[in-house]
Amino acid sequence: MNAKEYKLVAVVGVSDDASKYGHKIFRDLLKAGYPVKGVNPKGGFVLGQNIYKSVSDLEQRPDLVITVVPPSATEGVVEECNKLGVKHIWMQPGSDSDKAVQKAGEYGIKITQACFMVIKGVW
């Protein structure tokens, strides 16, 4: 699988702190050619890219959302994705919770609980 399998990937939890995983994942997905947009409630710019304040603010619905946020924030992302019709959420290690996984299941959203970067061969 490669970057071409997605029309738009949203990374929720992008940080301007280069030591944080939200920054590293966003940076390396951009380098690998993924069609990626960053999301952080603070907004702003990271790596020259506009950072959206929510998944709802994106111009188009992503076909994949990757969460790199605390579990309680992931639960909110699941709710937002359900309203938007997003069908796949990839929860990075440490961002998942039983509640988020259960809710996603109830909504029919596919969940992957693993490191996207390792599974997809980016890292």
Image (cartoon, rainbow, N blue to C red):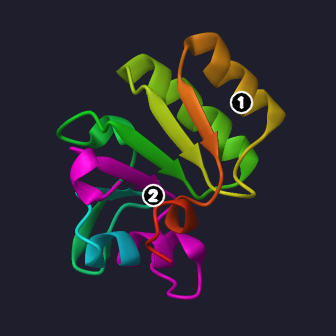
In the image, which disc is placed on residue 40? 2
* Vertical comparison of 67 with 72: above or below: below
Of residues 16 and 88, which is closer to you in this image? 88
Answer with the quarter of the image where residue 29 lies: bottom left
Q: Which amino acid type corresponds to the residue marked 2 in the rendered image?
A: Asn
Q: Tell me where residue 71 appears, x and y as whole percent.
A: 73, 47
Q: Tell me where residue 89 appears, x and y as whole percent.
A: 52, 38
Question: Does the magenta segment cover residue 26?
Answer: yes
* Vertical comparison of 122 with 19: above or below: above
Of residues 33 and 85, which is closer to you in this image? 33
Q: Tell me where residue 19 appears, x and y as whole percent.
A: 58, 87
Question: Does the magenta segment cover residue 83?
Answer: no
Q: Which amino acid type corresponds to the residue marked 1 in the rendered image?
A: Val
At horizontal 69% and vertical 52% (from top left) the residue drawn is 95
Answer with the quarter of the image where residue 57 lies: top left
On screen, residue 96 versus residue 87, left or right, reads: right
* Secondary structure beneath label 1: helix
Of residues 69 and 107, which is closer to you in this image? 107
Residue positioned most to the front: 1
* Vertical comparison of 106 with 64: above or below: above
- Residue on which disc 1 sits: 101
At horizontal 50% and vertical 87% (from top left) the residue drawn is 18
**Mark 2 or mark 1, which is nearer to you?**
1
At horizontal 19% and vertical 36% (from top left) the residue drawn is 60
Q: Is residue 15 visible?
A: no
Please state the extent of the stretch shown in magenta in the rendering: 1-27
* Secondary structure beneath label 2: loop
Query: Dot 2, how many residues are within 10 Å of its Cα: few (below 14), some (14-19), or many (20+)?
Result: many
Answer with the quarter of the image where residue 94 lies: bottom right
